[in-house]
Structure formats: C-alpha cells, structure tokens
Image: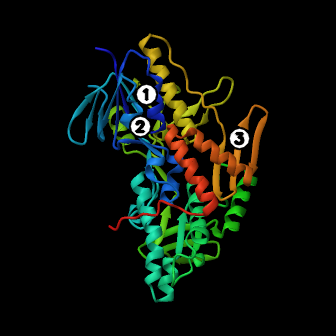
Amino acid sequence: MRPQVLIIGCGFGGLEAARALRAADVDITVIDRTNHHLFQPLLYQVATAGLSAPSIAAPTRHLFRAQRNVTTLLGEVVAIDAQSRTVTLKDGALLRWDHLIVAAGATHSYFGRDEWAPHAPGLKTLDDAFEIRRRVLMAFEMAEREDDPARRAALLQFVVVGGGPTGVELAGTFAEIARHTLPGEFRRIDPRQARVLLVEGNARVLQAMPERLSERAREQLTALGVEVKLNARVTGIDAEGLDLTTAAGPERLLSRCIVWAAGVAASPLGRALADATGCTLDRAGRVVVEPDLSLAGHPNIQVIGDLASAQSHAPGKEPRPVPGVSPGAKQMGRCAAANILKRLRGQPTTPFRYSDYGNLATIGRHSAVVDLGTPAGPLRFSGYLAWLFWLFAHVYFLIGFRNRFVVLMDWAWAYWTHDRHARVIAQK
C-alpha cells in the first residue's frame, strides 16, 4: 500500500498541504467538520450582508475533483492515537495514517468566561457570520417596533469587543450600514442615529501594526462614526449589555447586539494531541512544534496553522514567532508537505522559514491601512490607495475564478449604490 497521509482540516494550511502533494506517490485523506473551504479574511463581509456565503466558500470535493490521490471526508476528529496511528471520529469510526498533518485551526476565547458566548458571538465560521448578520438586522427591525426611547436606544447600540483586524472591519462596516445602506428604508427610526462602539482593552487598535498606522486606523474609524474606547476592559456581558472598567471607572453599556472579536483559542484537538503524545501546549492551547513543524518524538505528526505555536528559523537570524495569519498557514502547509516527501526519501527535513508579506486591514469605504515588508524596507500607507490595495489583494487570493468575479461585481455595485444585497435573514 502507498503511504497514507491524513490531513485534519481544510483551511488555508490543510488545503495548501494537500495541493503540494498532488504529484506525490501517496494516498491523501482530507477530513473536515464542514464540506467547504472558507476564505476567512472576508467572512466579516458575510456577517455584514456585503457578500453571500458562496462568494467566499468553495465545496471541498470540488476543489479536489481533479486530484486523484485525494479522498475527501466529512467528519469531526475527537481523538488521536499516536501509537496505533489512528484517529477516532465523533461517530466512532477509525481512520489509519502513516503521516498526520493537523490543521484544525482556532476558535473563540472568552478568557475563561464562556457564559458570555450566547450574548456576544464571535466570528470564525459561516454559522457565526449568519448569526451576527441576523442579530444586526433584527436589531433595526425590533427598534422600528419599539415605542420606549430607552429600549430603542439599546437596540440601536452596537458594540464590537476587540480592536484587531476583525473588530476594526466589523465596526467600520456596521457604521456604514447605519449611515449609508439603511436610511430611507424605515419609517419610525432613523438608522443614522445608531451608535457603534469599538471596545479595546489596550492603548491602541491594530496592535500588530506600527503605531502610526494604528493611530491612522483610529482616526478613520472616528471619521466613519465609530466611537473607539481604548484601555477599556470587559468585566461582564449579559443579555442586556456589557460592563466595562475604564480609566474613569466602571461603565455600563446597554446593547442588544454585541460581537466578540477579542480572543482566539486553539482547537480542542491541541489537548487531544497533548494527551496522545505528551507534547507541550502554550497558554493559548497551541501545540509547541519542532523547527520542522513536527512533534518532539513523533516525526510523522506535524501541526500547522493557527493550532501550531511555531517559529520561523531563517539562516543567521534568531527564531521568531509566526503570526496566526493566512500566509503563515499556507507556508506551513507547503513546508509540511515537503518534509513528508523528504522523510519518504530518507532525507533530513527542513526547518520552517516564514516570509512576512505584511499586514492589511480595511476600516471602511476608502479607508484601510497597509504595512508591507519589501526588500527595500517597510512600505506603509493608508487611506484610499490602501483601500484599493486591500481590495485587489483579497480578490486575487480568493479560491476560483467565479468567486473572484462575483465578489468584484458585488463590491462594484455596493461602491456605486451603497446597497448590501445579502440582507436576507431567517427567523430562529
């Protein structure tokens, strides 16, 4: 039998690893809890009714239809046995492997306060995006029927917790919906009176970017109508709102629509791997890997993407942590595939080396910040040119020509009309 390669997860890392093995003399099984690959950087556009789900997702089976050495399975892995080289699925089925790549991704972290989750959904999956979209649009619908001014104000107060790229993008888009998309469609309320707040526990938004671009992002958010609360830590969330601790003291915000974008935790499979192999987990639950992305004592198991606590090992430089972004996951996927081929040939494996292409974040219409790494040094800019760069970069990296075309057409239509066509919601 040919060597069996099992890839858990079909995100950026898992997809790239499988594709890198397209010409290899191996049998590959890709298993995922969903039947689609998701372009997560644009997931917030589904949550804010700018794009429909098929525009940023592609069926996994369709992606591998021409790759004859790949078998695609729909299922959830719940346990890993490193000794017998098997994984157990939620339905009790067993899958055998000779080489294992774990690319299970990440989920939300509420920093030990999981009771907040029902009141403040995060954004990681299409289901999350649908729920956030439903809550946002239903808030306006309920406000239209509300006679009490105080309850109406709470319905029209939207709070995003977390000032990273997702939080910034969501807050900016909520403000655009209220000020440009919905006016004229309601008779008893003025959507432009909606209040959008971005709550960040640190001193600035977009912590991964240089301070100048971070400040520029805050200014652009303010220009869109977003109220940015810095150094504000959440101490409680319930069905009626959230409690904050700020420099001025405790503060209570009444809101029926809160979105969580403040914390990320590794997939529970990290703990399953630790139980099976004795590997080390970091504080976020990520698996600490060797330089070649394998586990210590288990060279045939590799962990990539958001689940891996990995470092870049460039020649002549100190190792540095790899950020949890899609380019990092893709590069890890290619490295993991290349190292499997080296092991099959009896060759030494290669340490992972991350190429940092920079960071992008959009704030809203004509507003974005870009921090690029170039051979000549950092290239940093913001505003309209940064927005255009962000737009075309995301269209370029989408999976499939149809998705690129549809997204470009939807964005062009929204640019000229301010309309968001994906505002269909289903009642629970």
Label 2 sits on residue: 10
Instruction: Choose between 398 and 342: the one closer to the eye.
Output: 398
- Percent across and percent down for residue 35 are 35, 42
Q: Mark 3 points at which residue?
A: 372
Q: Please tell me whether mark 2 sits on a helix, a strand or a loop.
A: loop
Amino acid type assigned to the residue bearing label 3 in the image: Leu
Q: Name the residue under label 1.
A: 18
Specify the amino acid type for callout 2: Cys
Q: What residue type is labelled 1?
A: Ala
Element class at badge 3: strand
Labelled pair 1, 2 in contact (Cβ < 8 Å): yes
Q: Distance between the residues labelled 1 and 2?
A: 9 Å
The local crowd at label 3, few if under 14, some if 14 to 19, many if 20 or more residues have their Cα within 10 Å, is: some
Task: Look at the image and tell me whether residue 163 can be seen.
Answer: no
Which disc, if any, is residue 299? Answer: none
Q: In this view, does 227 lie above or below 53?
A: below
